[in-house]
Image: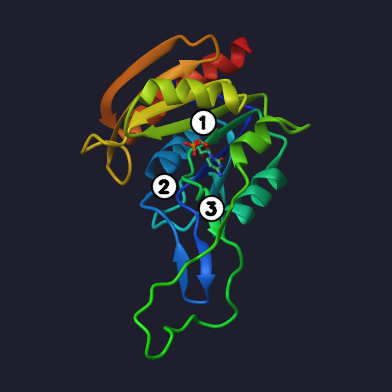
Amino acid sequence: FERGLLAGRHILINAGPTREAIDPVRYISNHSSGKMGFALAEAAAEAGARVTLVAGPVNLPTPARVQRVDVVSAQQMLDACLAALPADLFIASAAVADYRPDACAEQKLKKTPGSDDGMTLTLVRNPDILATLASHSERPGFCVGFAAETQDVLGYARDKLQRKNLDLIIANDVSQSGIGFNSDDNAVTLIDRDLTSTHLPQASKQKLARDLISRLATRLDRH
Ligand code: C5P
């Protein structure tokens, strides 16, 4: 792992979940810990890059020499990522909520008195941050997505790579316990634009992050 590998490069990484407000006290979110994205930010900084890390709500310390921007919702995460452009490399590791409540109630929602009826929330689609940056006029030179799947992992990953106009997708099987969401370990398969795939077996997210960063540096140099 060479320290000057990414010298002079600006790497943009997003990480963690987003929170979509229902009312002043409630939200919709997911179990993303942000660990993989933070490990990537740390490794990219160690490799000499200038790193912007746009983080959703997570409980993690900011890696050394990383510029961290904290956000809550998907819309805020998109705005912060756009504001960080231009970038040589964008790694979208955030677990962005696909939907948000159509409006955030101004006051705390109350149960209907005397009724046991359920309630219905109307959700609207959130912007796709990765697809937006990958088709932007200031598109980062190299765009990398994550595909966390529970079935047909490689099939869905290839589809995302093409649909979102990515240079590389990192697929992981979140149905396997001990890897992926919230775990300290991960195991991934890289799929390049020409659909060649490279499997990186289970390792700590720190070790995997260093391996991924050096493989990405090679691709940036070839690009
Ligand atoms: O389509 P899916 O959500 O599975 O794609 C995962 C990839 O797309 C991840 O890299 C994730 O960060 C990104 N994504 C995004 N904005 C969304 C949904 C997903 O950037 N609204």
In this rendering, position of residue 173 left or right of residue 214: left
Residue visible at 60% across and 36% down? 130
- Quadrant containing the N terminus is top left
The residue identified by callout 2 is: 34
Q: CA distance from mark 3 to mark 2?
A: 19 Å
- Residue 213 visible in image: no
Front position among marks 1 and 2? 1
Q: CA distance from mark 1 to mark 2?
A: 14 Å
Quadrant in the picture for residue 82:
top right
- The label shown at residue 83 is none
Residue visible at 32% across and 29% down? 151
Q: CA distance from mark 3 to mark 1?
A: 19 Å
Q: Disc 2 on helix, strand or loop?
A: loop
Q: Are marks 3 and 2 in contact (CB under 8 Å)?
A: no
Residue type marked 2 = Gly
- The label shown at residue 99 is 3
The residue identified by callout 1 is: 145
Residue type marked 3 = Tyr
Front position among marks 3 and 1? 3
Vertical comparison of 140 with 74: above or below: above
Q: Is mark 3 within 8 Å of ligand 1?
A: no
In this rendering, position of residue 82 left or right of residue 99: right
* Residue furthest to the left: 177
- Residue 25 visible in image: yes
Q: Is mark 1 within 8 Å of ligand 1?
A: yes
